[in-house]
Structures are given as structure tokens and as C-alpha cells.
Amino acid sequence: MSFDLVLFGGTGDLAWRKLMPALFQAFRHGSLPAEGRIIGVSREDLTEDAYRELIRSRFKAVEGAKRPSEEEFKKFSEMLTFQRMDLSKPSDYAQLADLLKTRNAETVVMYVATAPSLFTQVVEQIAAAGLNGPQTRVVLEKPLGHDLASNQAINAAVRKVLHENQVFRIDHYLGKPSVQNLFALRFGNSLFEPIWRREHIANIQITIAEDLGVEKRGAFYDQTGALRDMVQNHALQLVCAIGMEPPINAHADAIRDEKLKVLRSLKRWTPETLGLHAIRGQYTAGTAYGERVPGYKEEAGVPPDSRTETFVALRTEIENWRWAGVPIYIRTGKRLGSRDARIEMNFRPAPHAIFRTPVGVANKLVINLQPKDGLELHLLAQAQDQRVTIKGGVRSDMVPLAPVQLDLDFDKRFGAERVGAYERLLLDVIAGRLNLFVRSDEQEEAWRWVEPLIDSWGADGAPRPYAAGTWGPSASSAMIARDGFAWGEEQ
Ligand code: BG6
């Protein structure tokens, strides 16, 4: 199958950090259709050779085994070409149209990895140049807008010129192998379904922790913050994957209908819950990797009086029959203790104790997203010697139990070189598979839910400070402790 992939933002951060390495992996795995062309677009004045050289130089930063050899890069780079464009100029889109006409590929993917403020303009201009035909698929990167109104405006502009099934709103968390395995675990097996509900689950915890700071993205991040960067999209998509009802089939809309219902059922915010169930923090100087690192306000591009949050902890509920009353805790942040993303389903303790169990320990299922990718089932077992103990002359019949875990390591089982999130999603776009992409109504509902937080945080005070390398402000632990729970072990 022939395809052209036009990469707006072709010299940008995302192109060289994620997209090019993912395209190269797909090429190396032989899954990228051979008759393809990748057209990098940017306003820089580059020749095709200079563009190839630029991408080659950036591959040097790619970790060991994933880096192409000279020979491999040479072959891969034959797919790469470059088009200089000023995205505001219709004549430049006409030139792009001419370039595309030289091949008339069966599929044309327009990947808009530019600043979000340019999305509407790019999509409108693509259409004005007649490039929105049925063979075209448009990929929109997050953040799609900065609030509900701006998101709706982008969606409305997109809807005018493209069918919903031509629009691929990317959330790369949905492409992670562990998230796909969560769907497999829930809907390919019957084991967990009967207990995947309020009667058996005490609470759900989602942690997406990063140890890095904002790196070179300070100026962008300061306009965004953790709520828009991680919660509105990635964390809420995880809530959907855990909370949704089984879809009637595996088609994109069947899945997306169920996810939308979850978003619609999320507990609405009240002045009281905004105070008690939403904690934000900002990192100060601290220690990471044994070294002193600066605080957020000292990072390049960040104003010294910034009130942008780099940490968020929230408590919510899905208000439906399956989940009513089960707290869902979400926390995410930069410069936390380690890079660690996981979902913990904490089961209720046994209703009647005939064994001695360690305090506060019950069954839990942990879905590890990264750095490890796998499942852990935490159980209690008789791990100790069973000789009857006589305590103070009284025989104790309460045998002690100890925590043990069944550990399924997907990397070990299926190989660490499995298809990465962007690789998977790019191939899905080329193949026209929408299952792992977000529909406009889902996205709008997610904005609707976070908007009261944006408004309330915009109106008052500064985030709570936490030292880099710790697990966020203590208010986050206090929030969960009020329900009688604690965050799962920090790794
Ligand atoms: C991106 C955010 O969407 O996800 C980044 O914009 C964040 O700030 C990244 O670092 C995390 O992705 P991953 O796959 O490394 O967990």
C-alpha cells in the first residue's frame, strides 16, 4: 500500500524524540508499507539532504539497540523528503498539493505536530488546497485546545472539512502495550469481570510519576501544567479503560461509546470537593539521581512567579451501578521519586478474619505501565512455618499470613522489543484503524470535567511546594488518608 506521511512540525521536538524513532522501528520491523514517503514540513530552509542529515544526527540520541546502523539509516532515509512551508500561506499548500500529486498515494496522513494554536489554520488550509479527500487522514497531537471552548472551536473547524473517521486524535497512552493488555485482561478473560465492581473493589489508584523535570519545554509547560498535560487526556483515558463496560465489539465507535459514558459519569465538582479532593503542587529544588536539581521556577523559560502546577492529586468516582462509591485516586507529576506509572485495583479485605493478616494488606491487582510492563496479583499466603505458637501460655489458632505476589512480566514473556506506543499508533493511522484514538465528544467531555479545576486554580493562590525527588505535597497523602487508605508503595 502506498502512503505519504506529511509531518507538520517536521523539525520539532516531537518529530525527533518520538515520531522519527517510531517510524524507523516500524521500518526496521518491516511493518511500514515499503512504498511510503515521509515528508517533513517546517519553515526552515533545508534541502532534502540537509533534512536527512538533521534526522540522522538526532538519531544519535536514541538509546542503544534502537539506534539505526549507517546502512539501516541510509535505507530508511530514502523515504524522507522535505518541504519548506509557511503554514499561513495558501501558495505553500498548493506546492504541497503538487508534491503529493507526483505520487497520488492511496493514503495521505497529515500529522499536525505543531503548536496547538496552528491546528485550525492548518486543517482549514489543507481543505482549501483540496487536500481533504477521502484518502486523507489527519492526526492531531495533544493538547487539543487549552479549555473546553478552545477544544470545541478546533473540533468545529475540523468537522467542517473532514469526516470524524478521518480524524485521529492521538493520546499515546492508549498505544502503550500495557494499556492494550488492560483491555485484553478485562474483555478477553472472564476471570476478573465478576469482581470488577464496587462490591469487591475498595479503591482504585492511578499513578503516573515522572522523575524528569520540564527539561527544555519550560515555556510550553508553563502555559499547560500537569492538569492539562497529563490528567485531561492520559489519566482520564486510563480511568475509561478501567471503568468502561464491555463494548459490544472491538470497533472504534463501540469502544468510544463506552469510554464516553465513563467520562459522563465522573462525579461533578462542587466547591467542597474542589477544596478537599484536588491537590496541586509545584516542585522546588531537590535531589534527583543523587544530584541537586533546580526548582520549577528556576527552569529555563519559566517565569519566577509562575503558579503553574507540576503535580496533581485528585479523588473522583464513577457514578454508576458498577462503581458508585468507589474512590478513584489519580496522581501525576514531574520530578517525583521515580519514573513509575501504574494502576492499582485494591480489593476489599476478607469479610471475616480466621487468619492473622498484616494490618492494611489486602488483595490487589497492579497493572504496571512503565518502566516495567506487566501485571502483579498480590495475595496472602502461609509463607511462614506452621508450628502452633504459644503466646503467654495461650495457644494461638490465628495462623499468620504473609503477602506474596504473582508477577507476570510482559517484557520477559513477549520480549522487551515490543511495538512502542507511537509505532503502534502511526501504523494504525496508516491502516485507518481508529480504535485507539479519541473521538471529539470524549475529548470535550474530558475538558468539561477538568474545567472547574482550571477555573478554581486560576482564581486562587499558588500550588503547594514539594521538593524535587519526593512524592508531591503531603496534602496528597492526607487526601487519601481521610478515606482510610494510603497510596500504594512508591517504587
Ligand atoms: C506527554 C506529556 O504527553 O507525555 C509530557 O506532554 C510527558 O509532559 C509525556 O513527559 C509522558 O509520556 P511517557 O510515555 O514518557 O509516560
Image (cartoon, helix red, strand yellow):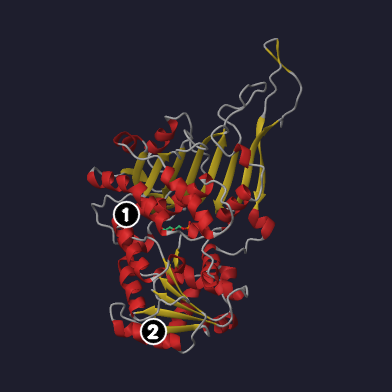
Q: With respect to residue 195, does 82 lie above or below? A: below
The quadrant the N terminus occupies is bottom right
According to the image, label 1 marks what residue?
Answer: 148
Q: Could you say which quadrant of the image residue 40 lies in? A: bottom left
Q: How many marks?
A: 2
Q: Earlier in the sequence, mark 2 or mark 1?
A: 2
Q: Nearer the viewer, residue 465 or 232?
A: 232
| Percent x, y of residue 46 | 38, 85
On the question of residue 17 being in view, the answer is: yes
The reply to whether dot 2 and dot 1 touch (C-beta < 8 Å) is no
Q: With respect to residue 270, does 54 lie above or below? A: below
The answer to whether the residue bearing label 1 lies less than 8 angstroms from the nearest atom of ligand 1 is no
Residue at image position (44%, 49%) is 236
Residue at image position (58%, 54%) is 178
User: Which residue appears farthest toward the top when viewing the image?
Assistant: 393
Q: Could you say which quadrant of the image residue 133 lies in? A: bottom left
Q: With respect to residue 154, does 283 lie above or below? A: above
Q: Nearer the viewer, residue 483 or 157?
A: 157
Q: Quadrant of ligand 1?
A: bottom left
Q: Nearer the viewer, residue 333 or 317?
A: 317
On the question of residue 471 being in view, the answer is: no
Q: Residues within 10 Å of mark 1 (few under 14, many from 20)?
A: some
According to the image, label 2 marks what residue?
Answer: 96
| Percent x, y of residue 53 | 46, 83
Q: Residues within 10 Å of mark 2 (few under 14, many from 20)?
A: many
| Percent x, y of residue 465 | 32, 44
| Percent x, y of residue 232 | 39, 52
Q: Considering the numbered disc 2 on the image, is that residue within a helix, a strand or a loop? A: helix
Q: Considering the numbered disc 1 on the image, is that residue within a helix, a strand or a loop? A: helix
Name the kind of residue labelled 2 in the image: Leu
Name the kind of residue labelled 1 in the image: Leu
